Amino acid sequence: MQDLFSVRDKVVHVCGGSRGIGRAIAMAFHEAGARVIVSARNREALAATGLEFEVCDIADSAQIRRCVDNIVARHGRLDVLFNVAGINYRHAAETYPEERLDDILAVNLRGNYLMAQACGRVMIGQGGGKIINVASLHSHFSLAGMAPYGASKGAIAAMTRALAVEWARYNIQVNAIAPGFIQTDLNRALWEQEEIRRWALERTPAGRLGVPEDLVGVAIFLASAASDYMTGQVLYVDGGLTAGQTWPLKVPR
Ligand code: NAI
């Protein structure tokens, strides 16, 4: 039974692994005995993880190809891709700056797609693999000020299903994790605002914000043999937020 969830000796690439959610997943897989490679743009932040790393900006397709080629040259295979890299910028939809829209789509959509494509080609050649994308609450509903981010995360959910359907015949499973409100560097300033924090806590049935480590269990499941017959799914890890809301009605106890 323990083997079912084993990721020991698997070659695992965490793209966007220098901090936040990606870093927590990378550390957990390292502890579980996987051969972990983290990639991101910032060499110092990558080196600080103490893990094997590749400097790679996924907005640049040549860097993606070089990153994946280097991993395969060193390890001979690539079993798991975590497509975690993502950016956000909040602004009113009607005046949203075009260059910010382009940046978000270049990373969250085009970059994630091209990384999945490059890793998928390796996995097709070796007879299988796992791709785990990172979707969002925005794949399911919207919050004001984040239209391009929401569009990119809706696309991640659609891409997850599309690649799952197309690559199932190659024994590649493609799924996505949709995190709820997780405290990271991406949104630290947001959660420091008392009003926003209270708003989020009221809407999260679990009664707390998430931390990156809350995503590790589902990450292990999706990377291991335990999920071999599951593909094309978006798993919400959100403290119950998308399941529904508590409300002030007094019910008999
Ligand atoms: P973060 O900002 O702490 O980490 C993002 C990672 O992506 C970093 O390693 C960064 O270097 C990397 N990255 C950004 N642009 C890149 C590029 N062009 N090329 C290569 N790497 C790049 O963010 P966090 O919170 O850990 O988010 C990770 C993922 O989870 C993102 O896709 C985000 O949209 C998603 N997410 C986060 C939620 C949260 O509440 N923190 C909720 C839902 C989804």
Image (tube, rainbow, N blue to C red):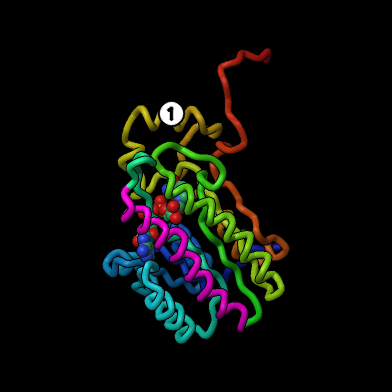
Q: Nearer the viewer, residue 5 or 16?
A: 16
Q: Is residue 18 visible?
A: no
Could you say where residue 248 lies in the image, as x and y percent from the top left?
Answer: 56, 17
113 with respect to 160 (left or right)? left
Q: Residue at x 66, y 80 (%)?
A: 127
Q: Residue at x 63, y 63 (%)?
A: 162
Range of magenta residues: 97-125
Could you say where residue 175 lies in the image, as x and y percent from the top left?
Answer: 61, 59
Q: Is residue 130 above or below residue 150?
A: below
**Which quadrant contains ligand 1?**
bottom left
Q: Is residue 223 visible?
A: yes
Q: Residue at x 47, y 64 (%)?
A: 112
Label 1 packing within 10 angstroms: few (<14), some (14-19), many (20+): few
Q: Quadrant of residue 223?
A: bottom right
Q: Nearer the viewer, residue 26 or 99?
A: 99
Q: Quadrant of residue 56?
A: bottom left
The amino acid on which the numbered mark 1 sits, given as a three-letter code, is Trp
Q: Is residue 59 above or below residue 89?
A: below
- Residue 101, magenta (yes or no): yes
192 with respect to 7 (left or right)? left
The residue at which mark 1 appears reads as 199
Q: Nearer the viewer, residue 12 or 103?
A: 103
Numbered disc 1: secondary structure = helix
The quadrant in which the N terminus is found is: bottom right
Could you say where residue 79 lies in the image, as x and y percent from the top left?
Answer: 57, 74
Could you say where residue 189 lies in the image, as x and y percent from the top left?
Answer: 30, 41
Q: Quadrant of residue 49?
A: bottom left
